Each structure stands twice: as C-alpha cells, then as structure tokens.
Image (cartoon, rainbow, N blue to C red):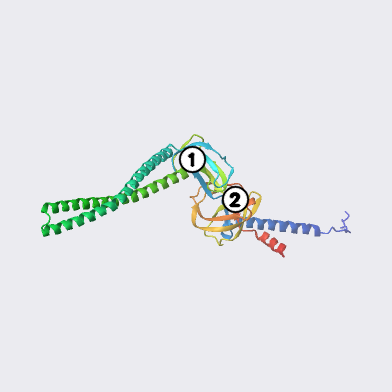
Amino acid sequence: MRSLKQRRVSFVRPAEPRARRLTVIRWVYLGSIFILAMWLANFFFGDLLYLRSEGLVIGQPSVVAAEFPVTVRDLLVREGEHVKAGQVAAVVTSQEVLETIARLSADIAARQVRLGELRIRDQTIDAMLALAEDRDKVATGARKEFERLVQQGYQSLDKRTAAVESEYRSRQDLETLKAEKRSVDEELRILSAVLGEAESALRDLRHNYDEGRLRASIDGIVSRLSVDKGAVVRAGEPLIEIYGLPHYVLAYLPTGGLFTVAAGDRVEISTGLRTMPGTIVRVEPFAAALPREFQRSFIPVERQQVIRVEFNTEGDAPPLFTKVQIRSPSVVRQWLAALRNK
C-alpha cells in the first residue's frame, strides 16, 4: 500500500472574524447580566437610594352644603363642570328656615311696638318730671311757712298737717316718676339691645339662606353630585363636591431611606409614557395610610409620610384622581440638561 502523504494546504482561512464574534457575544452576555443585576437591585433596593413613590392628582377639596335641613329643588351644575367662586350651584328650600324667619319677623315687630310705647312713656315722664319737681319745691316751701306761722300762733295745727300731707303726696309722685323713669330707661336699653340682636340674627339668617341659593366657595371642578332633585338633605350633609384649582399631587414618601427630601426639590411626575416636571412644596409632619390601590397584597396596612407636589406647569396636570408615580430626576437627563446649558 502506498502511504498517504499529507497534502499541504496553500490557503488557511483566518480565525479573526469568529474570535470577534465570540467577543461581542461575551460582552452582550455580560452587559445583559449587568443590566439584569441593576434592574433587580433597583427593584428591591431602589426605594432606599432615591425617591420613588406613588400619588394621586387632587385639588383643594370643598363641598356645597346647607346649614339646615333642606329639600333640593334644582341642581345647576354637572359632574366635571368648571365652577367659579360665588356661582350658584343648587337651589333648595327649607320649611324650618322659613318658619324661623316668620317667627323672628313677628317677634321683631312686637318688640318694635313695645319699644315705641316705652319711648312715648319716657317722653311723658320727662315732661311731667319738671312739673313734679316744681310742685315738690312749692309744697316744701309751703310746709316750712306753715310751721313758722304755727310757731308764731297765726295758724292752726290742722293747716300745718294739711301742708305736710300735700308735701308728702308731691314727694311721693316725684319719686314715683323718677323710679319709673329709671325703669323705663333700663327697659329701653335692654329692649334695644335684644331688638338689635334679633334683627342681626334675622339678617344673618336671610343672608345664609339667600332665598335657597347655595353657592360654590372656590374655583374648581365638580367631582360628584351627592344628591338628586327632590332629595331631602340633613344639615351639613354635602350636596356637591368640588376640587379646586390648581391641581397638585398628594404623594407618599417611604420612610427609612438613604436619601433626604425637602421642600423645593425637583421631581418627575409620570403616568404611563407621559412625564411632567414638578416641585415638592411641602413635606407634611405626619404619615397617612396609603389608598387601597397602593397597598400590596397579603401585608398589613402600610403608612407613609405625605408630601405635596405641585406641577411646574398647570396645563400639564392630568385629570383628577389620576394615579401617578413620583421619582427623583433621572441622572442621565440631568447630565444632558447640563450639557445643553453649556
């Protein structure tokens, strides 16, 4: 047998492309592992390193309610409608208020009649008081003159007795008028004060009732109509709920993190793929229970510190009660903004 000779290969395919491909695959793999590790670290420990929380878009709450039991006659606003402060939102009637107004009006009228009578009596007393004082002076002078004449023997004792009796009656009438004057003046003072209070109460009641018109107290958006036409509502029960403008975010700040949050800090407010800039305006000194949709299942009810975040531009605010995420500004975006400013 002939031995097989190894043939020389004149062309050898270089291995560089394969080696580069393996290197790229290796780096892609390592990068994927690194990104996965960073994502897991951010998922489990991100809340400890930077602000990341959830909140609700709300406004300053206000309600339209009556201070007395009423019957709803008409509702002049709808849910979602913008209202202005002072705008009539509902028309109601209250039998209790109408009866109170009628009773107060009758009471004021009776007091005014009595006040007029007292003033006439006071003027009469003033007119008679001067005459009574002159009569008392004359009677006193006559009694003294009769005493002198009796001592000199020119008059009998019965004349002196009659002079004393006349002085007594004049003094009695004078003191009676003075006492009545004081009593009438005191009654006038008390009745005038009571009448003023009654008239003030009637004015306040008429102003508060305002012919049954209930007005919005703030500019805002009607979020809920709590009653229907014809409903009977108790005193203080809300008829209409309004959330004022501008809207803001009430967010929850996890406690125990390695970062600090203060008023004036910039944050990012995101909902879905939309991101809006915001500013923390207040860090409340209390913790509140998170809404049910923010709670994680199978764990006790969680409480977190409350912060208030305002939108830098009011037109960017999502609708009321939108669930949003609050995050510290992205480091990459901060770098890009710094480079853009340069």
For disc 1, the marked residue is 211
Q: Residue at x 29, y 50 (%)?
A: 128
Give left or right: position of 290 versus 136: right
Give left or right: position of 195 versus 273: left
Give left or right: position of 167 versus 112: left
Q: Residue at x 34, y 51 (%)?
A: 189
Name the kind of residue labelled 2 in the image: Val
For disc 2, the marked residue is 324
Q: Nearer the viewer, residue 332 or 168?
A: 168
Q: Quadrant of the C terminus?
A: bottom right
Q: Nearer the viewer, residue 120 or 60?
A: 120
Q: Position of residue 62 (x, y in %)?
A: 52, 47
Give left or right: position of 238 versus 166: right
Name the kind of residue labelled 1 in the image: Glu
Q: CA distance from mark 1 to mark 2?
A: 43 Å
Q: Nearer the viewer, residue 308 or 89?
A: 89
| Residue 308 in view in this figure | yes
Q: Earlier in the sequence, mark 1 or mark 2?
A: 1
Q: Is residue 316 above or below residue 148?
A: above
Q: Position of residue 145 (x, y in %)?
A: 17, 57
Q: Position of residue 252 (x, y in %)?
A: 54, 54
Residue extending farthest front: 154
Q: Residue at x 31, y 50 (%)?
A: 127
